[in-house]
Image (cartoon, rainbow, N blue to C red):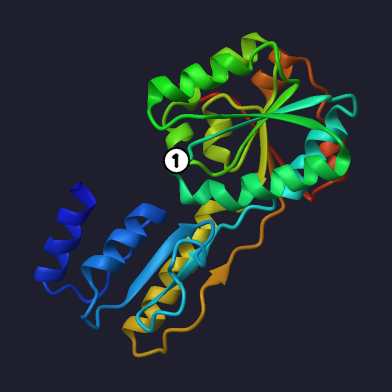
Amino acid sequence: SMLNQIGTQVVADGVDMIIPIATLAAQSMVTAADGTDIPIVYAAISDPEGAGLTGIDTVTGVSDALNTNFIMDMMFAADPDIQTVGLLYSNSEINSEAPIRDAKAYLDAKGIAYVEKTGNTANEVIAAASDLVGRVDAVFTPTDNVVMATEAAVAELLNEAGIPHYTGADSFVTSGAFATCGVNYTELGTKTADIAFDILMGGAIGDFHVMEGGIITVNTETAEAVGIDYSVFSTMANTVNEVVTAE
């Protein structure tokens, strides 16, 4: 409801452009600007097509589409003996639909069992994470904003249980998750600004841009807590960033 209010206000203000970040904000701004010629340049949308943000003349932006299979490869490179994987996400997050579908296909092909748990509030997410303890050997969460909002508590639960949490963005990792492989969000922001500036200077609105990923981020404190040697990651990517949990 707040996003709808913001959209109504910025359209009434007659802004020259709207730059929403993440899927729900982008969808709300597209709805608010419908019938106007205000260009919208979104940032950090995992699945623009699935979110209904393609095929609109006034809309473009930058995608941080997740390479789910690569993250699954990381998981099994670090621990080839994994028997069951937890899939923790919000079923209200469009961002999570395609990566979870991809993760299931990967695990099915490999003959690995998985347990799905979802939550749409902080309490539900924490309860879902708690229910995975003792049932899975690793957990995967895509670029899911609902889970991210409570990642510090989720990470504490999983780390104490010795369960590595593989996620869709480095923000999870600085909140305590074990590892991810994704895009550089500073570069994503710069690319978004470049597209926006070009349009404001009279350039055409083209197709959305997909950022190249390949940057592995590992929380060294979490690696120690869950007892995983992540040295194998250096053979999988040119860049392995080591971080610790933010205060």
107 relative to 46, above or below:
above
Q: In the image shown, does 224 or 83 lie closer to the viewer? A: 83
Which residue does the numbered mark 1 point to in the structure image? 145
Judged left or right of residue 1, residue 70 is right
Residue name at image x 59 percent, y 42 percent: 142
Residue name at image x 38 percent, y 28 percent: 121
Residue name at image x 79 percent, y 51 percent: 238
Q: Does residue 173 appear anywhere in the picture?
A: yes
Q: In the image shown, does 38 or 233 lie closer to the viewer? A: 38
Residue name at image x 39 percent, y 25 percent: 122
Judged left or right of residue 157, residue 226 is right
Can you say which quadrant of the picture contains the C terminus? Answer: top left
Q: Residues within 10 Å of mark 1 (few under 14, many from 20)?
A: many
x and y percentages locating residue 133 in the rendered image: 64, 13
92 relative to 214, above or below:
above
x and y percentages locating residue 138 in the rendered image: 72, 25
x and y percentages locating residue 99 in the rendered image: 63, 49
Q: Residue 164: name its quadrant.
A: top right
Judged left or right of residue 93, residue 168 is right
Q: Does residue 182 appear anywhere in the picture?
A: no
Q: Amino acid at mark 1?
A: Asn
Q: How many marks?
A: 1
196 relative to 91, above or below:
below
Q: Residue 107: name its quadrant.
A: top right
Judged left or right of residue 238, residue 183 is left
Q: In the image shown, does 147 or 183 lie closer to the viewer? A: 147
Describe the element under mark 1 as helix, strand or loop: helix
